[in-house]
Image (cartoon, rainbow, N blue to C red):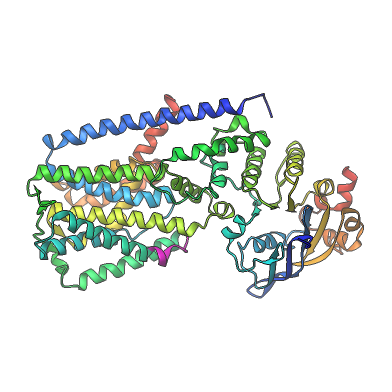
Amino acid sequence: MSNPYILQTRGLVKTFRGFQAVDHVDLQIRQGDIHALIGPNGAGKTTVFNLLTKFLIPTRGQILYKGEDITSLKSAAIARRGVVRSFQISAVFPHMTALENIRVALQTFEGNSFSFWQSGARLNKLNERAMELLDAVGLTSFANTTTVELAYGRKRALELATTLAMEPEILLLDEPTQGMGSEDVDRVVELVRSAAKGRTVLMVEHNLSVVSKLCDRITVLAQGAVLTEGDYETVSADPRVREVYMGSDGSGERGATETNPASAEAAQ
Amino acid sequence: MNQPVNPADIHKAIVEQQKIQDRKKLMVNGVLLLLLLAAPFVMYPVFLMKILCFALFAVAFNLLFGFTGLLSFGHAAFLATGGYTTGYLLSNFSGLTTEMGIIAGTAMATLLGLAFALLSIRRQGIYFAMVTLALAQLVFFFFVQSEFTGGEDGMHGIPRGELFGLINLEDNLNMYYFVLVVFIACYLLVQRIVGSPYGQILKAIKQNEPRAVSLGYNVDRYKILAFVISAALAGLAGSMKSVVFQLASLNDAHWHMSGEVILMTLVGGMGTLLGPVVGATFVVNIEYLLSQGPLRDWVDPILGGTFVLTVLAFRSGIVGEIQKFIKKNLG
C-alpha cells in the first residue's frame, strides 16, 4: 500500500452539550512511528483516544485505518482489526491470575468465547503463548498470582502484555507511566520500545523525558485543537507550546513543572 | 526478571493445582449428593422439594448476579411464567405428560428472558435493576388481570401426572427424586458454564467491562446469553415448583420474590457455586421454623435484619466466609 499513514482522522469533532472538547483534529499517524499526543490537562487527549476506539461516538469527522473508513465500527470490532488501546488507570482483571488475564486476550481469536458447554481445560492450549508473553514483560514467576496482589508497575506490565496478546498493528497507550516511580518508568520505556518493533504506537504521555526518549513524532493538543506537530526538537522549541503549558500569565496548570518541556530537558 | 525461572515448570505447577481443585470439587459434590439421596428418609419430601426449587431459582439468579455482575430485580417474572405456563398446560390438556408441561414452561420463561434482556442489557447498575423491575411489574399486572391464572386466588389443583407417562409423580418419593435429578443437572450445568471458555469471558466482563471491550469482546451479546440462560433456569424452577405444590400463585410473580432470591444469594454467598443453595436452604428453613413459633409475625423483620447483617458484616455470605476461613487457616 502506498498510504504511509496507518491511522488518520479528518475534522474530528466531539461536543459535550455545547462544549467543544475536540475541535477539528486532523491526526496523521505514520506506520511504524512512536507518536506522542501531549498537551496540558483538559486538552482533550484522552477524549481523542476514546473517539479513536469508539468508546465515545464522534460528533463529526472521519477516522481512517489503513485508508479505510472505520468511523462507524464498534469498539470491539476496531480492537479485532488491530487497533488496541490501554487505559489511564491500569486495566486488568483483578481477580484473575496473570496467566488468565492474558488468556482472555488470546481467546478473542479462538472462536469459542460463547461455548458455555465446553470444559475450561480447552483453554490450556493457550498457556504456552501466554507464558511467552508474560516472560517478555518479566512476569513469569507471577503467572499464578492473582492480579490484585501485584505491585502497580507489574500491573501495567501485565496490561501491556495483554494488549500485545491481541497482536495489534497499532497500540494506543494512555499514559503508560502515570503514577510510577522512576525505576518503573525506565522499565516501561524499555517495554514500549520493544513492543513497538514492527508496530505503530500512539501514546498520551505527560512525562516529557519519556516522550523525548521514545517518540519519533509529537502532536500537541490545546483546548481540543492541534497546536503544532513535529519531532521533539521542533515542538519543544515552539514558544506557543511553552505558553500553553505555563499559561501566558504565568499561573500555570496543575503539574506544569513536571510536564514543562524546558524542565524535562534540564533533567536529562 | 527477578530470579531465573522456567516458564514450563511454572505452567506445570499451575495445571497440577487445577487438578487438585477439580478433585476437591468432586469430593464436595459427592458428599452433598449422598446427603440429598438419603434426605427424604429423614425429612418430609415436600419440604425438601421446596428447598430444591428455591435453590434452583437462586442458582439461576446467581449465574447472572454473582458471575456476570448484573443485578436483575425482576427474576420473579421468570419463576411465575414457568409456573403458570406449566400449570395451565397440565390442567387443561390431559394428553400432556408432566415433562412436556415443564419443558413448555421453561421455554416460555426463556423467551420472556430474551425479551427482558434485549430491552435492558444496555443499561448499567441501578438502571438495569430498575428496568428489570419495571418489566417484571408489567408481567405481574398481566398475571393479575388474566383469567387463566385465577387472579388473586391462584391456580389450584395442577395435576402432577406421570413422568414420561410411566412414573407416577403423585408419589412424593418419586416426585422428590425427579426434582433432585433436575436440580443436579442444572447445578452441574451452571458449574460447567462458570468454568467454560464462555465463563472466562463473563468473569472478565464482570471485573472490568471497558477492558473486555478493548480486547475485542462485544459484551452485550455475552450478557444477553447469560441473562437468557438464567431466565430459563429460573423458569424451570417455577415449573417444577408448580408441579410439586400443584399450585401457581401471584406470590411467585410479586416483586417480593425478586427480593427474596437476592437475599438467598447474598446470605449464601454470591459468586460461589454452593452459596445460593445454602442461602435458599437457610431462608426456607428460617421462614418455616419462625412460622411455627410465637415469632410468626416477625418473619420479615428477622429476614430483613439477616440481610442487613450480611451486607454489613459478612459480605461474602455463608459459603464465601467459610471459603475465606479455609484459605486463611488451612491453605
Q: Nearer the viewer, residue B40 or B309?
A: B40
Q: Position of residue B76 (x, y in %)?
A: 28, 59
Q: Position of residue B198 (x, y in %)?
A: 45, 48
Residue at the far bottom in the pictured view: A18
Tell whether B104 sits left or right of A44. left
Tell whether B168 sits left or right of A150. left
Q: Quadrant of residue A143?
A: top right
Task: Please name the residue shown 58% across and 27% down the image.
Answer: B8
Q: Quadrant of the N terminus of chain A?
A: bottom right
Q: Nearer the viewer, residue B20 or B64?
A: B20
Q: Position of residue A231 (x, y in %)?
A: 87, 55
Q: Quadrant of residue A35?
A: bottom right
Residue at the far front in the pictured view: A1
Q: Position of residue A116 (x, y in %)?
A: 40, 48
Q: Is residue B123 rendered magenta in the image? A: yes
Q: Quadrant of residue A20?
A: bottom right
Task: Please name the residue shown 27% across and 48% down the image.
Answer: B56
Magenta range is B117-124
Tell whether A161 sits left or right of A221. left
Instruction: Tell me if I can see residue B71 in this picture.
Output: no
Instruction: Tell me if I can see residue A212 in this picture.
Output: yes
Q: Nearer the viewer, residue A247 or A235?
A: A235
Q: Nearer the viewer, residue B89 or A222?
A: B89
Q: Is residue B24 rendered magenta in the image? A: no
Tell whether B222 sits left or right of B279. right
Q: Quadrant of the C terminus of chain A?
A: top right
Above or below, comparing residue B15 to residue B227 in the picture: above
